Image (spheres, rainbow, N blue to C red):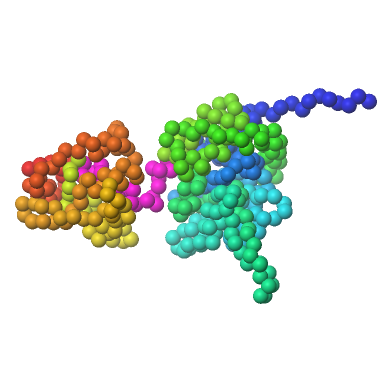
Amino acid sequence: MTPNTTPTPAIDGAALLDEVEAFHRKFNVFPREAAYVAVVLWDAHAHLIDCFETTPRIAFLSPEPGSGKSRALEIVELLTPRPVSTVSASANALYRLVDSAEGLPTVLFDEVDTIFGPKAGADEALRGFLNAGYRRIGGALRCVGDGSNQNAQVFGSYCAVAMAGLGSLPDTVLTRSVIIRMRKRAPNEKVEPYRQRIHEKQGHVLRDQLAKWADTVRDRVANAWPEMPEGITDRPADVWEPLLAVADAAGGTWPTRARAACLELVHAAHDNDEASLGVRLLTDLRDKVFCGADRMPTAAILECLLRMDDAPWGDLDDKPINSRTLAKMLGQYVTLANKPIKPRGIRTASGFPKGYYAEDLTDAWTRYCPPPPGESATSATSATPQVSGGESVADTATTIRHTPTESATQLTTTG
C-alpha cells in the first residue's frame, strides 16, 4: 500500500483569527472595535506564551455589575490552553499551579475587585504573583520542607492571566495589562444566549485550531521583533509586543488592525488612568492654572483648582486640596536643577506670599504631561509670556478673590 504523502494543508492564520473574533462577537459586546482585536490576539498569544519574554494581563473592568465581564472570561476560557478559573486563590496555590508538570495554565480571575477593592485591603502576595508573572524571569522564593528541615525553592509565576472586576486595579497591575473598559449593553445591542452544552464544543474546536496554528508559527514568533506604532515605548511596548508578534504571524489585515488597536487602547488607558493624581495635577496646573504665567501664588492656585467642577481637587480623602497637600504632591517631582519642586516667595505689591514658578514646573510638565491640545509637548512652555514684576501677580491674586467665576485663562492677565 502506498503511504499517503499528501501534505497537511497550511492553516490560514488570518482566517482563523477572523473566526475567533466572530465567536467572541456572538456573546460579547465590547465598548470599541479595538477591544475585539486585542482579545483575539490575547487568546492566540496564550498558545505561544513560551515564545515571549512577557505576557500581558488582560483586564475586563467596569463601574457597575452586569456589564459582560464574566461572560468575556467564559469565552476566553474556551479558547485558551489549560484554563483555570477562580474567584479566590492564594498566591502560594497559584505559584504551585504554575510549577506543576501539566504545563503553564491560563489563569482566569473573576471578581478580582474583591481582592484589590478599597474595602478589601491590599493583598501584597497576590499582587506580587500578578506582577512577577508578567515576565518570564519572575518568581517567588519560598521555604519548603518539614519542621526545621527547610530548603529554599524558587517557584515560577510566568503564565497568562485574564481578570474581570468592578472599578479599577492597583497601578502596578494596570500598567502590565491590556485594559478593556466594559459597559452595560444598550437596548439595541444584542448577543446570542450562551449555552455551555452547545458552545463549549464550538469554542474548543477553535482552541484546538489555535494550538495547531501556533505550532506552525512558533519559531517565527519566537524570533520576531515586531515594529511598534509611533509613540509606543517602555511598558506599553512590553505589553503589546507579544500581541503584535501574533498579528504579524497571522498576516492579512491583522498587523494593521493590531497596531491601530494598540494605539487606541494605550491612549484610552491613559485617559482613564485615575491612579496618577500627580500627573493630573501637573496637567491642570499647566493647562488651566498657569496658562502662560511665569508664577502663581499658592492661594491663587488653590482657588483655581477648587473651581474645576470635573476635577478631584475638592475631595481628596474627603478633604479639599490645601497648601500642604499641594506641596506634598508637587514635592515628588523635581526641577531642571534636579531639586524637589517647592513653594517659593513671590514679590507682590501687597506682600511676599508663597507660590510656584513655571520654571520649576517646566521639566515635570515636559516629562509627565501629555501634549497640550493642539500643541506639541514643548510649546506649552516655550511661548510663555513673562509676567513682569510683582504687580501682575498681585493683580492676579486680587482678580481671583473678587471674581471667582472668571475663566482660568483670565488668571494670567496683567492689570
**Residue 329 appears at what percent x and percent y?**
30, 56
Q: Residue at x 29, y 45 (%)?
A: 363
**Residue 115 appears at what percent x and percent y?**
51, 59
Q: Residue at x 86, y 26 (%)?
A: 4
Residue 153 versus residue 377: which sits nearer the camera? 153
Q: In the figure, is residue 1 to the left or right of 58?
A: right
Queried whether the magenta region covers residue 273, the answer comes back as yes
Q: In the figure, is residue 99 to the left or right of 190?
A: right
**Residue 339 appears at what percent x and percent y?**
28, 53
User: Where is the C terminus found, in terms of image quarters?
Assistant: top left
Residue bounds of the magenta highlight: 268-291
Magenta stretch secondary structure, dominant: helix
Is residue 298 placed above or below 79 in the rendered structure? below
Queried whether the magenta region covers residue 184, the answer comes back as no
Furthest residue in direction front, as rendered: 337
Q: Is residue 34 visible?
A: yes
Q: Residue at x 61, y 30 (%)?
A: 250
Image-quadrant location for residue 55: top right
Q: In the figure, is residue 233 to the left or right of 107?
A: left
Furthest residue in direction bottom, as rendered: 148
